[in-house]
Image (cartoon, grey):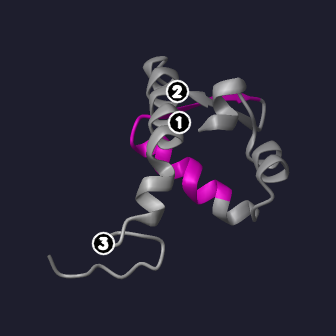
C-alpha cells in the first residue's frame, strides 16, 4: 500500500521494490483489488495498479502516526507483547 501511495506500479515493479516473490505480491494485490482498495489499469498486456480510494492515503498516514506513538508500548506490553503469548487477565 505504501508503494502504491507513491504512484501506480506493475506486479514486477512491486516485486523488485518489496523484495518478495512474484506469487506473494500477486496474491496480495489480487486480495486488495477484490476488497476494492486497489484498482488495475490495462495497457496492452500489462496491468498497472494504483490505490482505488484517495482516502487510503489519509488512513495510511494516521496508522503510521499511531504506530510511531504507540508501537513500543504495544511491543513491550506484558499481555500482548512480541512473544505472541497472551496471558490471562
In the displayed structure, would residue 34 be above or below residue 44? below
Q: Which of 2 and 37 is in front in this view?
A: 2
Q: Is mark 1 on a helix, strand or loop?
A: helix
Q: Horizontal placement of 43 versus 85: left or right?
A: right
In the picture of the structure, the residue carrying the numbered disc 1 is 64
Q: In which quarter of the image is the N terminus?
A: top right
Which of disc 3 and disc 2 is earlier in sequence? Answer: 2
Q: Name the residue under label 3.
A: 79
Q: Residue 33, which numbered label?
A: none
- The magenta segment: 25-43
Contact between labelled residues 1 and 2, with CB atoms less than 8 Å apart: yes
Is 27 within the magenta?
A: yes
The residue located at (81%, 58%) in the rendering is 19
Residue extending furthest top?
Answer: 54
In percent of width and height, residue 73 lies at 43, 54
What is the crowding at mark 1: few (fewer than 14 residues within 10 Å), some, or many (at least 20)? few
Q: What residue appears at the point 34 percent right and 69 percent down from the top-left corner?
A: 80
Q: Would residue 44 be found to the left or right of residue 75 on screen?
A: right
The one nearer the camera, 35 or 17, is 17
Crowd class of label 2 (few under 14; some 14 to 19; many from 20; radius 10 Å): few
Picture quarter containing residue 40? Answer: top right
How far apart are the alpha carbons under marks 2 and 3? 27 Å
Label located before the other in sequence (1 or 3): 1
Residue 61's tag is 2
| Quadrant containing the C terminus in the rendered view | bottom left
Q: Label 2: state its secondary structure.
A: helix
Amino acid at each position: 500500500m505504501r508503494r502504491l501511495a507513491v504512484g501506480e506500479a506493475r506486479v514486477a515493479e512491486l516485486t523488485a521494490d518489496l523484495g518478495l516473490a512474484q506469487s506473494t505480491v500477486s496474491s496480495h494485490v489480487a486480495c486488495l483489488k477484490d476488497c476494492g482498495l486497489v484498482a488495475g489499469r490495462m495497457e496492452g498486456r500489462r496491468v498497472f495498479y494504483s490505490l482505488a480510494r484517495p482516502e487510503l492515503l489519509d488512513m495510511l498516514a494516521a496508522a503510521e502516526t499511531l504506530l510511531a506513538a504507540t508501537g513500543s508500548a504495544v511491543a513491550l506490553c506484558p499481555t500482548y507483547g512480541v512473544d505472541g503469548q497472551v496471558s490471562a487477565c
